[in-house]
Image (spheres, rainbow, N blue to C red):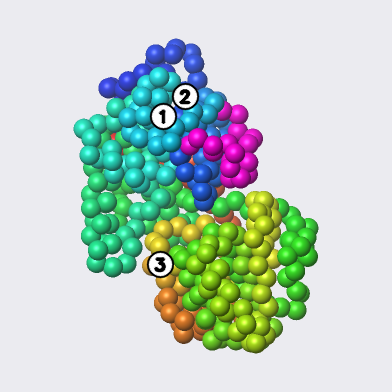
Amino acid sequence: MTWSRASAGRTGAREDRPGAPSRVLIVEPDVTGHRLLYVRLLAEAAQAAGHEVHLALAPGARRSVEFGLQLAGVDAPIHESARWSHDEVAALSRRLLTDRVLVPDGDRFAQRLALRPRWAGSGDLALLIMRPFPHPGLAARARGALKGALLRRAGRMRRAHLAVLSSPFSPPPGWRGVAVAIDPVLLEGTPGDVAAVRRRVGLRADCYWFAVLGVIDARKNLDLVLDALLTARPPATGVCLAGSIDAAARAALDSRRGALTAAGIELVVVEARLSNAEFDALVRAVDCVVVAHSNEGASGVLAKAATAGTRIAAAGARSLRRDCTALAVSSEWSELRVDALAGTLARARDAARPHPVPPADLASFTRPLLGDLAGAELPAG
C-alpha cells in the first residue's frame, strides 16, 4: 500500500478538522547529541510547508544547552513526559488528532512497536532508524539480526513507515526497499569565524593540527589516537581536543601529557561549550579530523569535515571505511590499531588540503520522513 491522506483506516487526523493545516507531532525524549538538530530541521520543514507542529520532549529539555542551540527559535507547543512510550505517544496523537507522528531516534520505538498488533495512534507514524548496522562480534551480529527482523515487521504495519539514516557519501547496505534519509550536514559561520576560533583556542599557524571533536568518551578511542600520534611523531604537529571529555578519556589524556610534551606535540583542550558556528569554524580551522570508533552508522563529524574541506583520518567501523572509499583523496581509513592509524596520520601530515565536498539538499533528510506533507510520497507500509 502506498500512503496517501485518504488512506483507509486512519484514525483522527485532518479529515476530522476540515480546512485545518496538517498537524505533525515530533517525538524526541533524548536531548543529547544531534537529535534536536533533526527535530529542528523536521519542524522547520513542516512549518515551511504550512503545517502545524507539536513537540514531545523530556521534562527539563527546555533548560538544556542543546535546546537553546537548536530549538529556541522554533515556535511550537511542547508536551513533556519522562518516557514517551508507545501508549503515551499514541494517546497524545489521538488527543491532538495528528496527521503524522515523527520519531527521529526511532530504533527502540520501532522494535517495541513490532511487538504490538498495530500502531494505535492518530495518523501515520514515521520512524528514523539511526543505527541500522550491527556492530562487530558474533553476539552483536545476533542482536543485529533480531533488531533487523523487528524493524522490518514494524515497517510492514499499516500506517507505519521506516526511513534509514544514511551517510551522505555511501548508502546503507542491506536495506533495499526502505526509504533513505541522508544525514544532514550544516556548516555555519564565515572565514572570519575560522580566524577568530584559531586565536581563541590557540591554534598556532606553524603547526599541523589533528583534532578529535564532539563527545569524547570511550567510544572515541582517545587512548589509541594519542598512542598512534606518539608512534607517528610527525613534525610540527599539534592535537586539538574539543567537546565534552568524559572521565575515561580524561584519564587517557592525563597519562599521556608528558609523552606528548616530550615528543614536541602541541596540545590544545577546549572544554567550553561551543556554539554551532564556533564548532563548525573549528572543523574548518584544523588540518585533519580523526574519527576512530567501531560504532556502525553515519558520522556527523566526518561529514562536516568532508564538507569543510578538512582531511579525515578514520579507523574502525566499516561504515567509516565505506565513507572513506567514497571520498577517496580527502580521507583514509585504517584498522582500529595503533600502528595502522599511525601510518594514516603520518600520510595525512604530508598530504595537501582536500577540496570541500558539496552537501546534500536538506530535503533529502526531511522528505522521506514528512512524505507527502512535504510534497513527496512515503514508501509503502
In x, y percent, where is residue 30?
A: 47, 43
User: If the image is split into quadrants, where does the C terminus sit?
Assistant: top left
Q: Residues within 10 Å of mark 1 (few under 14, many from 20)?
A: many
- Horizontal arrangement in the rendering, residue 153 relative to residue 203 (left or right): left
Q: Is mark 1 on a helix, strand or loop?
A: strand
Distance Cα–Cα, label 3 vs label 1: 34 Å
State the separation of the CA atoms marked 2 and 3. 39 Å
Relative to 85, is 258 on the left or the right?
Answer: right
Decide which of tag 2 and tag 3 comes sooner along the chain: 2
Residue at image position (61%, 45%) is 65
At label 1, the amino acid type is Arg
- Contact? badges 2 and 3 (CB < 8 Å): no
- Give the amino acid type for the residue marked by disc 3 in the picture: Ser
Q: Mark 1 and 2 residues: CB-CB less than 8 Å, in contact?
A: yes
Please, what secondary structure does the residue beneath circle 3 have? loop
Amino acid of disc 2 = Arg
- Which residue is disc 1 drawn over? 100
Could you say whether the residue bearing mark 2 is in a helix, strand or loop?
strand
Residue range of the region highlighted in magenta in the rendering: 58-76
In the image, residue 98 lies at what x, y percent?
42, 24
- Upstream in the sequence, badge 1 or badge 2? 2
Q: Does the magenta stretch include residue 355?
A: no
Which residue is found at the position 52% from the left and 81% from the top?
228
Q: Looking at the picture, does residue 317 appear above or below residue 144?
A: below
Q: Name the residue under label 2.
A: 23
Report the disc number at residue 294.
Answer: 3
